[in-house]
């Protein structure tokens, strides 16, 4: 059969498949599906306009060629072929490889924003497509399960009504279980894409259920693992950030997750700005959230997390990393004097900040202002008062003022200090927040 099908056009191949009856376990069906998948992949790649943008050549020729490719690709969206695929996926006699091929083929066709893809997604949502996909999430084969989730992700991304269907049909529990099964990068990537789509749902119950079912806990374990790829780690951070942005009980439940240690593990091994910045942003949110108590900061202190942050600030060559590292220290020292003590006890960090501040004042002098009056970033209903300033000088002054506040409160409780008897940090706010140590 391979030789006979090789010379058929895509439209002829689709017609051949639709007009012949096959046993769903047969090698013929498996081979035809493999050929259809290969055709779809090739056509999608060739049709990509960016592939032809080389700045030269005959524009009319390229336009005609692209139109021909589009017509050939459109033949794969034959309604009869879709009905055949759904019959294949509904039959108990269908072999594993055939089911895997059929689900992957549907994943290719339901992706993107073309009118054909949109029509196919509509067809799936109007009939029993969503029910069939959720059933396949429990298939014996992991390939079938994750391919089915990939199709479902395409529907979740483009069809908002599918969110309610997934919730109603018990799909969230199955999706959450797949987070525990995902051990390879492609599987983890599919799960995270699903999580990002579900976090955008207008139904608040969806992200709350995923939190309750342990999906987010699994994401945190990926962040903390050395085996996790940079791609997965970056998407995992984006998923957590989307959950933190939610309001109400979901936001509170998110902050109750044990996120500090995994984030610090990532900060220890990460080298790039694209991972360090979002990880530091999340750490600042957890350490600065007042409603959940001292636990995040206590964890950070116990595992030398603030030392990691201070080292990142000292090594930073990008201002974005330095700013976010200072932000973590600012929000922590603002509410916890233990962090202030830890920062002051670092052998080199304060001197480094002093040098940074001197350099900052030379290059961009500012008017003297009370650093504790820095405006808060984001929604004022949130308890974490993160400085919105993006310049190093303001962040250092804010950190200096926070430590000065705790030092003042301690002095009030301790009474007059013994003359010449201390070496603790003194913060001189009269000179722009510059930090000085007593000799």
Image (cartoon, helix red, strand yellow):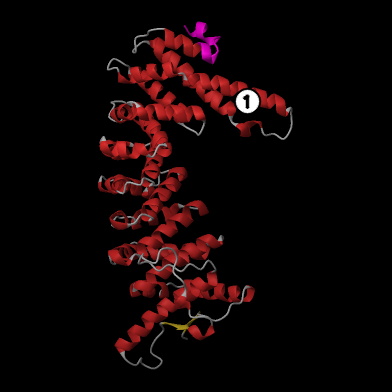
Q: Residue at x 47, y 67 (%)?
A: 326
8 is within the stretch colored magenta: yes
**Residue 421 locus on image (x, y percent):** 38, 89
At x 34%, y 93%, the residue is 416
Q: Residue at x 35, y 36 (%)?
A: 162
Q: Is residue 401 above or below residue 171?
A: below
User: Looking at the picture, does residue 411 appear above or below residue 98?
Assistant: below
Q: Is residue 339 above or below residue 274?
A: below
Quick one: 305 or 294, which is closer to the camera?
Answer: 294
The x, y position of residue 93, in whole percent, is: 28, 15
Residue 101, picture quadrant: top left
**Does the segment drawn in magenta span residue 359?**
no
Counting from the top left corner in percent of width and height, residue 353 is at 51, 73
Residue 69, x across and y down, in percent: 59, 22
Crowding around mark 1 (Cα neighbors within 10 Å: few <14, some 14 to 19, many 20+) is: some
Q: Tell how many labels.
A: 1
Pick whichever, 341 or 77, lies toward us: 77
Residue farthest to the front? 126
> Of helix, strand and loop, which mostly describes the magenta segment?
helix
Horizontal side of 92 relative to 354 (left or right) equals left
Would residue 149 appear left or right of 392 to someone viewing this image? left
Range covered by the magenta-colored residues: 1-12
Query: Which of the 4 image quarters holds residue 264?
Result: bottom left
Give the residue at x 39% y 67%.
380
Q: Is label 1 in a helix, a strand or a loop?
A: helix
| 74 is higher (above) or lower (below) than 284 | above
Residue that badge 1 annotates: 66
Is residue 348 visible from the viewing direction of this image? no
**Can residue 411 be seen in this snapshot?**
yes
């Amino acid at each position: 059969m391979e030789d006979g099908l090789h010379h058929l056009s895509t439209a002829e191949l689709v017609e051949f498949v639709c007009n012949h009856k096959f046993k769903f376990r047969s090698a013929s069906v498996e081979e035809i599906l493999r050929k259809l998948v290969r055709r779809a992949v090739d056509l999608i790649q060739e049709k990509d306009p960016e592939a032809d943008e080389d700045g030269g050549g005959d524009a009319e020729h390229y336009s005609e060629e692209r139109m021909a490719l589009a017509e050939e690709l459109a033949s794969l969206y034959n309604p009869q072929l879709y009905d055949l695929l759904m019959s294949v996926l509904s039959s108990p006699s269908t072999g594993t490889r055939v089911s895997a091929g059929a689900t992957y083929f549907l994943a290719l066709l339901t992706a993107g924003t073309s009118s054909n893809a949109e029509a196919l997604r509509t067809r799936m949502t109007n009939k029993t497509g969503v029910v069939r996909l959720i059933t396949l999430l429990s298939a014996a084969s992991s390939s079938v399960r994750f391919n089915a989730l990939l199709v479902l992700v395409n529907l979740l991304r483009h069809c908002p009504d599918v969110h309610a269907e997934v919730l109603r049909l018990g799909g969230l529990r199955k999706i959450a279980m797949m987070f525990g099964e995902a051990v390879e990068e492609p599987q983890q990537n599919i799960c995270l894409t699903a999580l990002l789509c579900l976090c955008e749902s207008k139904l608040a119950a969806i992200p709350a259920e995923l939190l309750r079912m342990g999906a987010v806990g699994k994401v945190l374990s990926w962040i903390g693992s050395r085996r996790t790829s940079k791609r997965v780690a970056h998407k995992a951070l984006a998923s957590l950030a989307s959950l933190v942005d939610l309001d109400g009980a979901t936001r509170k439940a998110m902050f109750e997750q044990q996120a500090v240690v995994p984030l610090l593990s990532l900060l220890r091994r990460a080298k790039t700005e694209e991972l360090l910045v979002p990880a530091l942003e999340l750490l600042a949110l957890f350490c600065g959230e007042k409603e959940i108590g001292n636990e995040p900061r206590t964890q950070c202190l116990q595992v030398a997390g603030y030392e990691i942050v201070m080292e990142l600030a000292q090594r930073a060559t990008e201002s974005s990393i330095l700013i976010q590292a200072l932000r973590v220290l600012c929000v922590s020292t603002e509410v916890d004097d233990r962090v202030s003590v830890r920062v002051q006890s670092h052998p080199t960090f304060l001197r480094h900040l002093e040098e940074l501040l001197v350099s900052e004042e030379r290059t961009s002098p500012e008017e003297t202002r009370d650093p504790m009056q820095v405006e808060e970033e984001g929604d004022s209903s949130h308890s974490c008062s993160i400085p919105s300033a993006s310049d190093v000088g303001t962040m250092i002054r804010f950190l200096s003022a926070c430590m000065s506040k705790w030092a003042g409160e301690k002095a009030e409780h301790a009474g007059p200090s013994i003359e010449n008897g201390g070496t603790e940090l003194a913060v001189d706010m009269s000179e722009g927040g510059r930090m000085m140590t007593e000799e």
